[in-house]
Image (tube, helix red, strand yellow):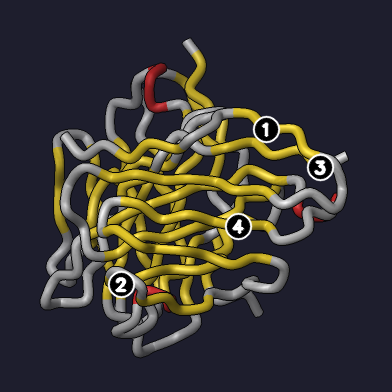
């Protein structure tokens, strides 16, 4: 069974703090993703990584950065947290198949509140 | 126009009923399609991929209509445990950055 874990289920941070969200997968997947999910907006891609040290911006990268130093670990960094970054953050991983079919496996999510 | 559109529901149906959802997508070059389910306060979980020929997994049937640019999910003999939000997911291109999630259709099965 694929397992994707996230470092925290709930996190409360103050405006301006630097925030690190960690994600680890145990299935040797090439691809890892960070999404945020907000009511009425669905899941929106922040960043994804297709290999160690490789990354690509998603739809809403502003205010975020990522790090992938090891294949199994993908970190999301909020350089200076703001209240509009209060959200549910979901990490996912997938193989890259020849048919460009990405079956994604999600972690349990981190509910971040910025006050 | 949204890239991937779903009826948000909620669909409220009795146990044992058959229910169907559609999802429309705007990019005719889209390459792969999926249905995920998401329980309240949980992460999305892959339900099934959707193939051009259609596919079935037990009580669940997924179909793709490329001409009209929609995918569908049919649930037969619905169970209380089917209550969840169903997310339509479309991969518009070769990059994983082109994976688009619909906002979901909420399904509630009543006894």
Pointer 4 residue: A77
Pointer 3 residue: A114
Q: CA distance from mark 3 to mark 4?
A: 14 Å
Of B13 and A110, which appears nearest the observer?
Answer: A110
In-image side of B95 versus A59 (left or right): left
Q: CA distance from mark 1 to mark 2?
A: 27 Å
Tell me the tag on residue A11. Answer: 1
Image label count: 4
Which callout, 3 or 4, points at the residue further toward the start of the chain? 4
Quadrant that contains the C terminus of chain A: top right
Report if residue B67 is visible in the image. no
The answer to whether marks 3 and 1 sit on the same chain is: yes
* Chain letter for the residue marked with disc 4 in the picture: A
* Chain letter for the residue marked with disc 3 in the picture: A
CB within 8 Å, label 1 to label 2: no
Q: Give SS at disc 1.
A: strand
């Amino acid at each position: 069974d694929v397992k994707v874990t996230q470092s925290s289920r709930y996190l409360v941070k103050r405006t301006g703090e630097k925030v690190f969200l960690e994600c680890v997968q145990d299935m040797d997947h090439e691809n890892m993703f960070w999404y945020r999910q907000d009511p009425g907006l669905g899941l929106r891609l922040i960043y994804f990584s297709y290999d160690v040290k490789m990354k690509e911006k998603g739809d809403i990268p502003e205010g975020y950065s990522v790090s992938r130093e090891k294949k199994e670990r993908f970190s999301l960094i909020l350089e200076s947290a703001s209240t509009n970054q209060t959200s549910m953050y979901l990490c996912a991983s997938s193989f890259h198949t020849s048919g460009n079919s990405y079956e994604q496996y999600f972690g349990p999510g981190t509910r971040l509140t910025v006050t | 126009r949204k890239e991937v559109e779903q009826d948000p529901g909620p669909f409220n149906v009795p146990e044992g009923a058959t229910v169907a959802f559609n999802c429309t997508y705007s990019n005719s070059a889209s390459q792969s399609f999926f249905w995920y389910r998401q329980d309240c306060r949980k992460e999305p979980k892959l339900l099934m991929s959707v193939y051009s020929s259609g596919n079935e997994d037990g009580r669940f049937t997924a179909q793709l209509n490329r001409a009209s640019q929609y995918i569908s999910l049919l649930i037969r003999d619905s169970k209380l445990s089917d209550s969840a939000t169903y997310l339509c997911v479309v991969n518009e291109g070769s990059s994983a950055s082109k994976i688009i999630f619909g906002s979901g259709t909420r399904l509630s099965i009543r006894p």
